[in-house]
Amino acid sequence: MIDTKYVTVSAEQPDEEVVSEAARVLDRGGLVAFPTETVYGLGADAFSDSAIRKLFDAKGRPADNPLIVHIADTTSLTSISASFPEIGLTLARTFWPGPLTLVVQRTDRVSDLVTAGLDSVAVRMPNHPVALSLIRKLGRGIVAPSANISGGPSPTTAHHVYDDLNGRIDFILDAGPTKIGVESTVLDITLTPPVILRKGGLSKEAIEAVVGQIDSDAGSEILKRSPGNRYKHYSPRASIRLVKEGNLEELSRILQDEVGSTKHIGCILHSIPDRHFGPNVIVRRIASDVEQISHMLFDLLREFDKSGVDLIIVEEVEEKGLGMAVMDRLRRGSAS
Ligand code: AMP
Ligand code: MG
């Protein structure tokens, strides 16, 4: 068991000394959890195989699920990407720092452990002062999957990280809850037109406004290019059932079916009106805008798990903009 150091820093103006200390931990091959604008990441030196092995181990992550390299300036791309197409430069100029990950051709300096043996590599520049400062202080890329035990809901607060990884990692930087709440959009730009391999914090519509039509419903062959799609993901301990947006009748029907057999039920609702649904039903109500839902989703799933709920019923959101990523997480979280 590792003695995990937990330090709180300001999100806007992080204490230089604290971030330097965390960077030294990374430099020595340690693991540091840090905030990004999407979710908390578990960072390791992208150029240290021993650190990366520790990272897979700490998360219980399958070794064939590749990692995203996080950078703080585009000049460091030369050590990571063998050819960065024009469309990538346009996207980087427009959306970096931000929740867009680009899959490009790798250099041989990038370890097979990072890419899971693929000939491509995923790279992004996160939009968070703590993350950017940490990368700059280390002076090279940081690989950073979500800082949780593989398979469960992603961490959107440092407390979530602590709950999952205390004793398994060296350092946690707490800068409060993350803004977006779902992971980055992963876009493969080695293909023409580019293909969304994972829906995320940057909408398809926003990308298309800059580079024209892209593909987001690629066939299963193409989705196999993103090994992360194969695994159980985002699943709380409780099972999840989805109910159509605004559909009180459907919710009542599900509750009637379940109330007898399920001990504790949690509901996450935004537009279905309030009722007294029963003594074993807890309702968490969120504002109807999709930004709020995305921001709160993983936190609510974890809260229900902590309170011993057996079934979580979630009201769906409209599948456009950020709603595409939210629905993707809900569907994958509810898959058994
Ligand atoms: P995570 O770090 O767990 O949030 O997820 C990273 C995601 O990026 C996973 O879905 C990976 O499958 C995907 N990914 C990372 N590297 C590559 C790559 N070289 N090619 C395709 N997908 C990738
Ligand atoms: Mg993850």
Image: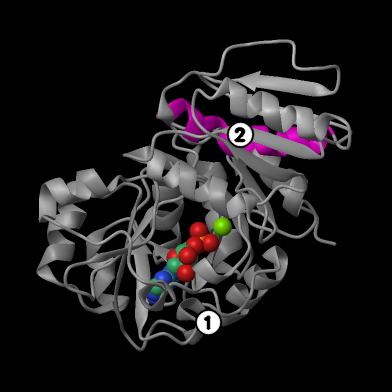
- Against 172, residue 245 (above or below) is above
**Residue 244 in the figure: left or right of residue 81:** right
Residue 140 in which image quadrant:
bottom left
Which residue is depicted at the point 74% across and 53% down? 165
Ligand 2 quarter of the rendering: bottom right
Query: Would you say residue 138 is visible in this rendering?
Result: yes
Q: Residues within 10 Å of mark 2 (few under 14, many from 20)?
A: many
What amino acid type should be assigned to the residue bearing mark 1? Leu
> Where residue 160 sits: x, y (%)?
68, 41
The residue indicated by pointer 1 is: 113
Distance, label 2 to label 1, CA atoms, is 36 Å
Q: Amino acid at mark 2?
A: Val
Q: Mark on residue 314?
A: 2
Give the side of residue 326 with respect to residue 60, left or right.
left
Dominant secondary structure of the residues highlighted in magenta in the image: helix
The vertical placement of 240 against 255, above or below, is below
Q: Can you tell which of label 2 and label 1 is closer to the viewer? A: 2
Above-or-below relation of 132 to 298: below
Residue 76 lies in the magenta stretch = no
Q: Which residues are magenta?
A: 291-307
Q: Nearer the viewer, residue 253 or 231?
A: 253
Quarter in which the N terminus is drawn: bottom right
Q: Position of residue 274 (x, y in %)?
A: 63, 11
Q: Is residue 213 above or below residue 173?
A: below
How many badges with numbers are in the image? 2
Q: Which residue occupies 77% across, 27% down? A: 256
Front residue of this view, candidates 267 and 183: 267
Using residue 311 as the reference point, say whether residue 69 is left or right of it: left
SS at mark 1 in the image: helix
Viewer can see residue 38: no
| Mark positioned earlier in the residue sequence (2 or 1) | 1
